Amino acid sequence: MAKTKTSGKIMQVVGISAGAIGGGMIGKFVPIQNEKIKAALPLVAGFFLVGRKGIMGDLGAGLIAAGAVKLGQSFGIGAMDYPVMDLDEVDTLEGIDESPVNGSEEFEESEM
């Protein structure tokens, strides 16, 4: 049975995903107190696997991705550290109720 392009891509996605999930779990089982070293472990493991063919290389790519994210977060870098403003907060921003657009009394006739 010939391998189709789609099944090859699916296996690649499965390998990378499994590596990323596994990379996130590696630090839980290693008794190292330093968070930066613990975060770098999946990165190092992925480095040794990424050059291999097939699913092992894909696992390595996932490990590198997970390790890079964890290492960045250990240094305070990463998109997950910055909260996104909720649209409900737009109405509660400072100064929004004192705007001439809102028609507050302060700006109605004194500014014209």
Image (spheres, helix red, strand yellow):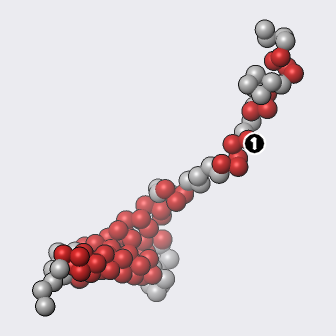
**Which residue is at a point 58% across and 52% down the rendered structure image?**
84
Q: Is 79 left or right of 41, judged from the image as shown?
A: right
Q: Position of residue 22 (x, y in %)?
A: 39, 81
- At 59% from the left and 54% from the top, the residue drawn is 83
The tally of labels here is 1
Q: Is residue 29 above or below residue 58?
A: below
Nearer-the-camera pick, 28 or 59: 59
Name the side, left or right, on which 74 lies relative to 3.
Answer: right
Residue 16 x, y percent position in the rendering: 31, 75
Tell which of 3 and 37 is nearer to you: 3
Vertical comparison of 42 with 1: above or below: above
Residue furthest out toward the bottom: 1
Residue at point 32% right, 70% down?
64
> Would you call the spot at circle 1 few (<14 residues within 10 Å), some (14-19), or many (20 or more)?
few
x, y percentage for residue 3? Answer: 15, 83
Q: Residue at x 78, y 8 (%)?
A: 112
- Most extreme residue toward the right is 105
* Quarter of the image with the N terminus in it: bottom left
Counting from the top left corner in percent of width and height, residue 79 is at 49, 56
Is 51 displayed left or right of 43 in the figure? left
Residue 40 or 57: which is nearer the viewer?
57
- 57 above or below 100? below
Evaluate whether residue 57 shows in this view: no
| Residue on which the image places disc 1 | 92
- Amino acid type, mark 1: Thr
Report if residue 97 is visible in the image. yes
Seen from the viewer's position, the closer of residues 29 and 24 is 24
Q: Quadrant of residue 15?
A: bottom left
Q: Secondary structure at mark 1?
A: helix
The residue most toward the top is 112
